[in-house]
Amino acid sequence: MDSIMSPVRRILDPVPERVDVRLVAIAAEHIRKAGAKRVTVVGIAEEAGMTHANVYRYFPSKEALIDAVVADALRPVELMMADIAGAPDPVDDKLERLTLALAHAYRDLAEKDRAIFEVYADIAAENRSVARRHRGRVFMFVERVVDEGAGIGVFHLRDREAAMSFLTDILFRFSHPAAILLDVGRPREVMEKRFAVLINVALRTLISGSV
């Protein structure tokens, strides 16, 4: 009987949480409670029920662990952008939706998880690799939509590099973490109106081939 039931038990048994995932979750809570500067590997190890030396098996430094916390917080933004970039919407609508969703996602993170977002802002200011990779993925999706529009004749790019730089400059105001933190106390509707004006200018510019 036991031999018959054991496969069923194995299927029903909960999957153990990965140690690295648990460490990231613990580190995130410590950041929220005390700030990144006060987080210690020893404290995280104690809560995880392991030695600090064991933590270093998964993350070579406190900085690497904090970077992993930020990467984990930003991953939903990247997944959301991938979904929008791959959607079958008209390309001009899709670019507007993509950039607006990015601004919303950052604003949401800054409001709901301020401590983690502030760490992201610090990492971005230091130009650490986790911030560079995230920024690269974000603009990869923007470029994908612009190239799609150019390929079907909706967008007319006189100079692709100049057009992408133009979009980057516009998005900087509504996607750079330092700018998000400056604006987080301002009403959303005000910022959305300002963003709508700029993205409409960007769309007209891409459609007309001004850059």
Image (tube, rainbow, N blue to C red):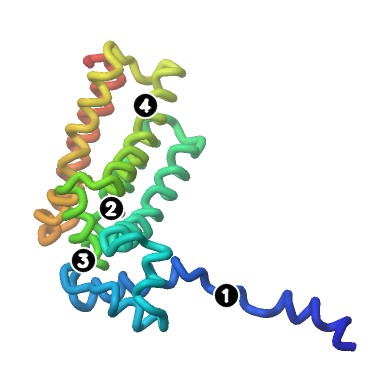
Quadrant location of the N terminus? bottom right
Q: How many residues crowd mark 2 within 10 Å: few (<14), some (14–19), many (20+)?
A: some
Residue identified by numbered label 2? 104
Q: In whole angstroms, how far apart are the C-alphas of marks 4 and 1? A: 43 Å
Q: How many residues crowd mark 4 within 10 Å: few (<14), some (14–19), many (20+)?
A: many
First-in-chain label (3 vs 1): 1
Residue depicted at 29% across the width and 72% down the height: 41
Q: Are marks 3 and 4 in contact (CB under 8 Å)?
A: no
Determine whether the residue tagged by mark 4 lies in a helix, strand or loop: helix
Residue identified by numbered label 4? 146
| Residue 198 at x, y percent in the picture | 18, 35
Q: Amino acid at mark 4?
A: Val
Q: Which mark is residue 211?
A: none
Q: Nearer the viewer, mark 3 or mark 4?
A: 3
First-in-chain label (4 vs 1): 1
Determine whether the residue tagged by mark 2 lies in a helix, strand or loop: helix
| Residue 47 at x, y percent in the picture | 36, 83
Q: How many marks?
A: 4
Residue identified by numbered label 3? 114
Q: Amino acid at mark 1?
A: Pro
Figure quadrant of residue 23:
bottom left
Q: Amino acid at mark 2?
A: His
Is residue 194 in view from this perspective? yes
First-in-chain label (3 vs 4): 3
